[in-house]
Amino acid sequence: MSELTFAIDGDALLWTGDGEYLRIEPWGKNSVRVRASKMHEIQEQEGALLPQNNQASDSHDYGITIDKPNRTAELRNGDIVVQAKASCGLYSGSGYEEPRCLLSFYKADGTPLIQEIPSGGSLNLRARWFKPITGGDYSIVASFTTPENEKLYGMGEYQQNILNLKGCTLELAHRNSQASIPFVVSSAGYGFLWNNPALGNVTFGKNRTEWQAESAKQIDYWITTGDTPSSIMKHYADATGHAPHMPEWGLGFWQCKLRYWNQRQLLDVAHGFKQRNIPLDLIVVDFFHWPHMGDFRFENEFWPDPKAMADELHSMGVKLMVSVWPQVALASENYVEMKSKNLLVRADKGEDVGMMFEGPSQFYDATNPKAREYVWEKCRTNYAELGVDAFWLDEAEPEYGTYDFDNYRYYAGPNQQVANIYPRDYNKGFYEGQQTIGGDGDIVNLTRCAWAGSQRYGSLVWSGDVGSTFADLRAQITCAIHMGMAGIPWFTTDMGGFHDGIIDSDDFKELLARWCAFSCFLPVMRNHGDRSLHTTTGKETITNSAGDHRSPSGADNEPWSYGPETEQIFRKFIAIREKMRPYTRELFESAHTDGQPLVRGLFYEFPQDESVSDIADEYMFGPDILVAPVVEAGARSREVTLPGNASITWTDLRTGKVYGGGAKNHCRRRNRHDSSLRTRRPRSRTDRNAINSRTTSVGRPFPRRTPHTLRIFPISTGLSAVCMADL
């Protein structure tokens, strides 16, 4: 009989054998962290978990026991229990004893959560597999058996119309419009974080779940349990960080386009909103307002007095956001200095270029603290000190020209091992810089990508350069839900999609109207896109006074650019957004304090209702507003599923008609002769008592929650067939 190698180190349970070091320890309420390494002790490495968070739920609910006769050990932390079973068998294939340790995870009442895969007898499988990379570290795989019928949500943003991720294989890598955030929540009552920024894949199979990293030094994951999705999300925020306070100017309407290319044009647009009495909280200066990528400043010819511009915007109550790209062009005034100081990403082979868009460039290395400091100082001097309020941290993946991930190396390590932390560190550099100039409580930075923990750095993630189609609109619903379940509560999209919406096309106007209604019920309502006039090539050519090329501008993208009918739709939903401020403010506060997503799948508020666990084209905006966008071109009606059971009622606030939970309702345009896009009146959801109302700042009724009331904002969100909360 071999020696039993369980040991206790403070609050942690240890096991060693066959070159492996295994460490299991409490990490927050009802949560544990597991790390395993091969041929070296456990190391402290870059990850998502906050440091020094390894505290048990409660001294009375925590404990470790080792049962030597049965060769088992158990760590208990609140409502989660880890059982470790050691074995040491003589395998005929090797001819010697091989010590193993198999982990199983349970709730305190004995309900199984997940278990590492067993050896399978003669199959001789390993739950923690370290495949050596010649001369280096390991390609690692961690394999688990999981409940066959569980539903899985989270993992960030993947452009697919799939809500339940069970059965999916996902790439653990970032791309433009793909944000890989390796946290998943199971309907079986657990949340799982793969605390490893390496490139890889995850497969949520029926027979097993496998997490794979192309190159890593150790396995590192975190598991929590809770009775509801909301409790799991709170534990996750406690472990990886809470989103900060959303400032008031994040609650209204944001205007942008590719691209406002001069100071006068931007101010004219802002004045256009004010003259038309359309509320505007923020306007954006998009990319290539600089001479070259990496200059991190305005080009003087087109932006002669940014300080005066910012002051004029502020006098109108409008905040200013400016785009920053992480690329540094070889022609940039900063390239040589940054290259000399090792502040850039480095290609391992071939030409040291990361992207060729508008000329060759390389990305600054956001994983290098000195590079973050350098870029922030440039942006502080050239933007923040001139009155810029927020930053648009674009290209945050970063977007390599050919996504040859394995050809790039960061300060933090080779791309294969650390690539996925880039967007988080990119945002971290600006967030911490803004804190130094007194920005706490007023920091929101728009960004195109995120990783686990990005939420604590004021990251508002948008879904990237998605297409302008109804299929793309539909996919944004699941993107929004999954981002929230991955711990990123601040999310938005390009209204109308990004690519080549033709502003005088009736088809695009219909899509934009649907997307506008959808955007009203996202954490941030933001209009942006690369628009075209007449055809997809209908852009505005830009040159400087010397005739040199400058990046072109798209067609107009203001609400009034699409004609009076579309402008009226914008006005309607911007007004609704304004009326919702008290409610939206509460949702952001819940995200800050408890880690709650603003956009929630129906399963989130109705976890016991199996019938809504996989509905991918409806969602809840907070606890009270049911949103059911129309996602088909030409549709003038759609079916809406009403969650809940007989204890939940849904009431039409216009007619007083009551619907029971669990029903389906068909909503359609109010007049069969009217095929135009028009607004409709509201319905609401309650359980037993009538909704009490209060008055918002614009004097409209706003429902108040009581202990026996489920609240829904009394508005119609339907544009004829857009049935958001319109039952």
Image (tube, grey):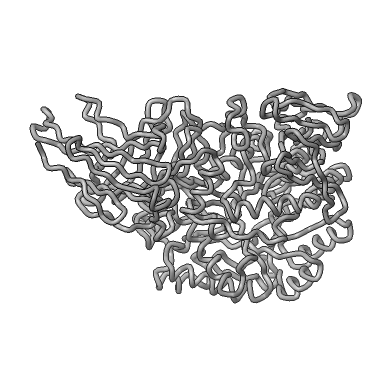
In which image quadrant can residue 271 be found? Answer: bottom right
Residue 549's place in the image compared with 404, above or below, is below
Q: Residue 222, how many percent across, how many down? A: 40, 46
Residue 425's place in the image compared with 661, above or below, is below
Q: Quadrant of the C terminus?
A: top right
Q: Residue 562, how many percent across, how many down? A: 82, 45
Left or right of residue 54: residue 571: right
Left or right of residue 468: residue 60: left
Nearest the camera: 464 or 597?
597
Is residue 562 something one can see in this rendering?
no
In which image quadrant can residue 508 be found? Answer: top right
Nearest the camera: 649 or 98?
649
Nearest the camera: 144 or 373?
144
Nearest the camera: 175 or 103?
103
Q: Residue 633, how many percent across, how many down? A: 74, 30
Residue 112's place in the image compared with 257, above or below, is above
The residue drawn where x is 75% and y is 30% is 649
Left or right of residue 538: residue 188: left
Is residue 610 something one can see in this rendering?
yes
